[in-house]
Amino acid sequence: MKKKAVACAVLGAALALSLAAFAACDQETEEQVAATGITLSAETLDLTVGETETLTATVEPADSTDTVEWSTDDGAVATVSDGVVTAVAAGTATITATAGDVTASCTVTVNEAEEQVAATGITLSAETLDLTVGETETLTATVEPADSTDTVEWSTDDGAVATVSDGVVTAVAAGTATITATAGDVTASCTVTVNEAYDVLVESADELIAAVEDTANEGKTIAVAAGSYTLTETVFITQDLTLVGNGDVTLTAAESGWEHDGANRGHSSIITVTNGANVTIRNLTVSGAKTVALTAGGNDYGHGINLAQAGEVTLEDVTATGNDGVGILVNDTVATLKNVHTSGNGWGGVNVDVVGRDWAVPETVLTVDGDCVFEERYQIYCDDADETAALTGKLDLPDTYTSVSDGGTVWTTADDVA
């Protein structure tokens, strides 16, 4: 009997411990907080077949332990998964979010996908634009047929020159860019020419001559309006300035009536830069300069551009053609040539020398970039041995040039100067 009593006592104690442990675990179970309200981010949605939209459910209180369950009353029209609604077919469905005993709903209307009509043609309101840096212009695209569902996409082939957004073209820097509008498989383009900002715009030969001589224009940019100009005297520059063509500009010597005093040199070329002037010339064509006999004997040779004891001069996007003398004369001047093209000039492309001026010859006298093209037999040359010696190491030319002796020295990309 004593053994049985002991066993019962032990069993009772164990049972008591188990019940106490169960009670302790039950106390540690998370307290349940029922949802009292729920709202959705939208009460209605309009979708096209195939589209998706995400609904967000907000449960109150924020610490509710009820999870959100999503359902649809017509999965043939719209389905839902974790709030992401997918439009399946035309019709109306109700999406419901449930948290505990509370619900919120969104009515979803699904429309048929629009019938796709391909663009067959597209035109722009302009095929060319001439802008100045900083200006904007709006292009309008017309798509055919009028009910085409293709949208118009805009692009530029050179965002450094001109950008485009929704047809609005912005001029960024001088140069040329092509703006393209695309609708489906069809395209249309507009060529945009961007000109530098300028201080003075000239529209006649007389205005040009006056502008470069006006001391009020020192350090300024003079733009020449697009067109062809017949000159009866040299564009004679003696002060720092920039001269640019605002579009396609050609300066040509008149066939007769050229004004020259018969005494001073440098007045038969199309453009002469002298007096130590630091000048930039861009986007111009010079042609037809004629040699003038001086009354005291000798000649004033007609060059395209005559740099005679100027300062530092840059020629960029310049063409010199059909001049009696040389296309570009670099005489005791530091010159940089970028994309310069010469052809049909009587003496050759570029003539360079440094012995006519009392100066410390700079480390580099002539710099020529790889975009320059000189079509004449004498592409770049120096007249005689003394001048060539003074130029040793002073020319910065592309590796494609080699020097050839021919009385003086010729630097050429050809095998010889025959």
Image (cartoon, rainbow, N blue to C red):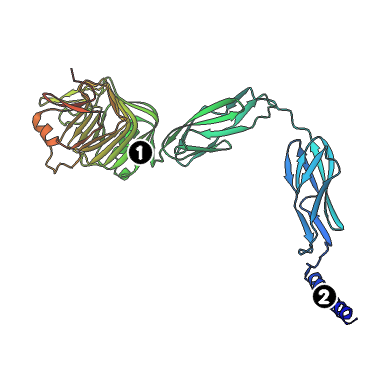
Q: Could you say where residue 286 lies in the image, as x and y percent from the top left?
A: 30, 27
Residue beneath the point at 88% across and 82% down? 2
Q: Quarter of the image for the N terminus: give it.
A: bottom right
Residue 86, position as x, y percentages in the image: 76, 41
Q: Are marks 2 and 1 in contact (CB under 8 Å)?
A: no
Task: Looking at the picture, tell me which residue is in the foreground, 61 or 410.
Answer: 61
Residue 211 lies in quadrant: top left
- Identify the element where label 1 is drawn: strand
Q: Residue at x 67, y 24 (%)?
A: 145
Identified at 20% across, 33% down, the residue is 330
The answer to whether residue 123 is visible is yes
Distance from disc 2 to disc 1, alpha carbons, whole Å, reads 107 Å
Q: Is residue 290 above or below residue 281?
A: above
Q: Nearer the viewer, residue 221 or 211?
A: 221
Q: What type is the residue that disc 1 sits on? A: Ile
In the displayed structure, 116 sits above or below 95; it is above
The three-letter code of the residue at mark 2 reads Ala
In front here: 139 or 112? Answer: 112
Q: Residue furthest bottom?
A: 2
**Neighbours of disc 2 within 10 Å: few (<14), some (14-19), many (20+):** few
Q: Nearer the viewer, mark 2 or mark 1?
A: 2
Judged left or right of residue 177, residue 58 is: right
Residue labelled with disc 1: 222
Q: Position of residue 10 (x, y in %)?
A: 83, 78
Taking the view exactly as shown, the residue that stands out farthest to the top is 418
Residue 310: x %, y % from top left: 21, 39
Q: From where the camera sits, is residue 355 visible?
A: no
Q: Out of 226 and 351, give the one closest to the viewer.
A: 351
According to the image, label 2 marks what residue? 14
- Which quarter of the picture shows residue 113? top right
> 10 Å neighbourhood of mark 1: few (<14), some, or many (≥20)?
many
